[in-house]
Amino acid sequence: MCPCSPDDAPVNGVNGVNGHANGTNGHANDVNGTNGVTNGDHSGFTPISSRSHNPRNPYAPVGDFLSNVGRFKIIESTLREGEQFANAFFDTEKKIEIAKALDDFGADYIELTSPAASEQSRLDCEAICKLGLKRSKILTHIRCHMDDARIAVETGVDGVDVVIGTSSFLREHSHGKDMTYIKNTAIEVIEYVKSKGIEIRFSSEDSFRSDLVDLLSLYSAVDKVGVNRVGIADTVGCASPRQVYDLVRTLRGVVSCDIETHFHNDTGCAIANAFCALEAGATHIDTSVLGIGERNGITPLGGLMARMIVADRDYVKSKYNLEKIKDIEDLVAEAVQVNIPFNNYITGFCAFTHKAGIHAKAILNNPSTYEIIDPADFGMTRYVHFASRLTGWNAIKSRAQQLKIEMTDAQYKECTAKIKALADIRPIAVDDADSIIHAFYRNLKHGLNKPLLQDMTAQEQALLAQKEKELAAEPEKRALDEQVDAEADADRLIKKAKTNGITA
Amino acid sequence: MCPCSPDDAPVNGVNGVNGHANGTNGHANDVNGTNGVTNGDHSGFTPISSRSHNPRNPYAPVGDFLSNVGRFKIIESTLREGEQFANAFFDTEKKIEIAKALDDFGADYIELTSPAASEQSRLDCEAICKLGLKRSKILTHIRCHMDDARIAVETGVDGVDVVIGTSSFLREHSHGKDMTYIKNTAIEVIEYVKSKGIEIRFSSEDSFRSDLVDLLSLYSAVDKVGVNRVGIADTVGCASPRQVYDLVRTLRGVVSCDIETHFHNDTGCAIANAFCALEAGATHIDTSVLGIGERNGITPLGGLMARMIVADRDYVKSKYNLEKIKDIEDLVAEAVQVNIPFNNYITGFCAFTHKAGIHAKAILNNPSTYEIIDPADFGMTRYVHFASRLTGWNAIKSRAQQLKIEMTDAQYKECTAKIKALADIRPIAVDDADSIIHAFYRNLKHGLNKPLLQDMTAQEQALLAQKEKELAAEPEKRALDEQVDAEADADRLIKKAKTNGITA
């Protein structure tokens, strides 16, 4: 759903009234674009949810009975899936640092590499179990085999995540077992781990290329012997969101235990798939910091938070320390020697940068116009980029005012025209734009005509003169801008007057 | 859908038989995990599609009447949306270079910044129209205003993309117009552009926060006057995949023209949303190279190709020069001064890298086990990472054989154990692993006991000795590995025998 503003209360999730529709049939109750609704005095009445409490936005999905969008849990797998990332080599100290950071963040579970993978993996697992983390439970991830289960249980973990391939690909080319062997071994391992009083999850690998009947039979069998969670894994990253919804929803009708999901990102759907899985009744999502893992990884922790805060801000903010994400990402990126991608969710350098004039203007009026996430929720700040040919005079006015330079609107517009002309000639840095505004203001105040940028070449100055001439000869574009702005202002005034009960 | 192998024929899209279900009810016709199907002789019969031709994988979505997954078109917006990216400054020469590269790739349309944005934008638009590109049509993107439309038409473009904000946010805080004004202006602009004999698209901005009734009324009106396409834009990146499906599907029932969609990636759903839009009947997807655009951008071209090749490999390969993606991404990344993200779809340095022992082993047997995309389709290569503590002996055996070093399986296993022990002590580069294999083999051949790595410190050598001692004292893990491998081999032999008609 798209809440109308980051400050709106979430409407999806636990209060769902309809298990089928997803919101396209709703009728608008905000036809005139005004948000105020007067409910009158209802003291003495107990409010109840009913269909008439539709969200204002008709596209917000009708809450689904199955949806766990407002009550999901995270299984953070940077120290397991993430350790399988090509560049990852975490020594004990680094693992402990990452585990503590994830605990501070509020990860519900931290999943570790199998203690059967190497002697050091076993020692690291034991060391992390002994940390006594405040919020995160410790899991380890093992093959479906009694020997691995015994080693795992001895490390002191809170739970064990068991996995085995079920697709014909993996049965044939990886472990070579048939479904009967898989089921019997799974039940043996589950009963053993349960007897030790710790949690156990059973997951197929490559679930989306496994046989549906096999899969449901197997999950039904492990559910009956009391497994805590079953897992659905898109091991190769082939699943699409609606497939995920359908498979998880079908599984939700077959098992009574929790449902964990694990999505690889080979085809760019890892976050969307996680979201659709929660809508369909999954309870747990596997993540890793920056999404690191086999190939190009899995659902990234920061990206999932971006998705979920839009879906249920209150739940996400009440549960996770979102402002820790940047530090955790920096920590892991350094450890695995990668750069934070320029377009990373939340923390990428342009996640909250606005550039086009039309965007900048609206953002300055109301950030919700072009922002669905409030950067402050993550301890980040918004940045309006104004030093480009696409800038608008509203952005320049705002920047000038930040610089304590007051001019008339006509002067801001003239200054903007000069910046646009310069930006047509060469890239302008933020520093340059500031210099231009200052220089323009000085010229204005002292009746000067000095160059607006100090380090311009003769060629650039000639080009600029030509641009300015062109701009002067073409007033219609600026006139259009001004007309649009004036009309917008007039419309706003009329609307405000109407809202205040005055008829225009 | 998840095809069983990259070589399988696609089953989705044009041959859909059911508009509703998405594949969870299918029954398996591959219960035993064998892929061979004997069809016998059918000469004289005309094959027809029928329900019995279900794909082998029951999760493959049942083809949807509305789906355009197998016949979509791309509107490549690097030179419009991408120009709004914080770092973008494309001069004329760079724009021409990018436009030519996109034409070589096979982009159906190239969308350019409004010629009304600046004088240079207008000149660049004219220059690109004059290139006479072979495959790509040229569009420009303008505000819904006659003045902009007149300027656009004069540039020589093949079509005009008109946009106006329709959410109450944008109507109030950006342009300030009401829906009647929007509709009337839209019709005026559409009729004018059509009269010039070129294509026209009309799109709302922020469609997912707009009033549904307003939106459908407006689209219905512009459809009636003969607009070529209407556009749905998730301007703030708030939409979820199932919302997208529902809105596009609803719209599909209201208009008869094409449907273009534009998805921002703020909450990580841009690729998934594009895919669901196509499933629901959208025809055109907006992309940009590396996804660059406002904030953290839109559906990336490479990422969309990753998604679509899994959905319909034949269509994608027949239409687009996929091996050009890497060059185009390098070109744009350099122009906007960003690094290709480590986890970029297709071209990121680890997109086709496999690390965990269990993965490496299966990949060597059959790449489809852990790969849904064949890297060769994109001119890329697979890389099996074997220099880690998570490596398995199959990966080391494969690497040794690449190095022309033949040993017994027992010797490969011993060599693997040494590499794992070393990798527990410090990160090992690929070069190091090669050196170790060579050194191990030399020691073996000449009965030596020289150090396996040249540059080890005394401390590292002491640690290694300790690790090796530990490994020697703990045979059960290796024994387990060997037992699992032996069983797998035996199962495979039995299965092969069965397939050949021999009963075990």
Image (cartoon, coloured by chain):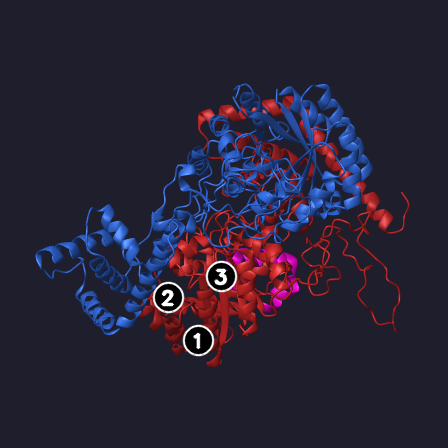
Chain colours: A red, B blue
Q: How many marks?
A: 3
| Residue type at the position of mark 2 | Lys
Nearer-N-terminus badge (1/3): 1
Please report, as a chain letter, where disc 1 is located.
A
Query: Magenta includes B480?
Result: no
One can see residue B215 in this view: yes
Label 2 vs label 1, nearer the camera: 1
Q: Which structural element holds mark 3?
A: strand
Asked whether A340 or B462 is in front, the reply is B462
Using the numbered discs, state the Cα–Cα distance from disc 3 to disc 2 in whole angstroms: 30 Å
Q: Start and end of the magenta stretch?
A: A299-326
Asked whether A470 or B402 is in front, the reply is B402
Q: Position of residue A54 (x, y in %)?
A: 79, 57
Q: Position of residue A421 (x, y in %)?
A: 56, 30
Q: Are callouts 3 and 2 both on one chain? A: yes
The residue beneath circle 1 is A157
Few, some or many C-alpha atoms within 10 Å of disc 2 (few <14, some 14-19, many ≥20)? some
The residue beneath circle 2 is A94
The residue beneath circle 3 is A204
| Residue type at the position of mark 1 | Val
Label 1 vs label 3, nearer the camera: 3
One can see residue A375 in this view: no
Nearer-N-terminus badge (3/2): 2
Question: Residue at horizontal 49%, vertical 78%?
Answer: A194
Few, some or many C-alpha atoms within 10 Å of disc 3 (few <14, some 14-19, many ≥20)? many
Nearer-N-terminus badge (2/1): 2
Asked whether B428 or A389 is in front, the reply is B428
Q: Decide: marks 3, 2 in contact (CB < 8 A)?
A: no
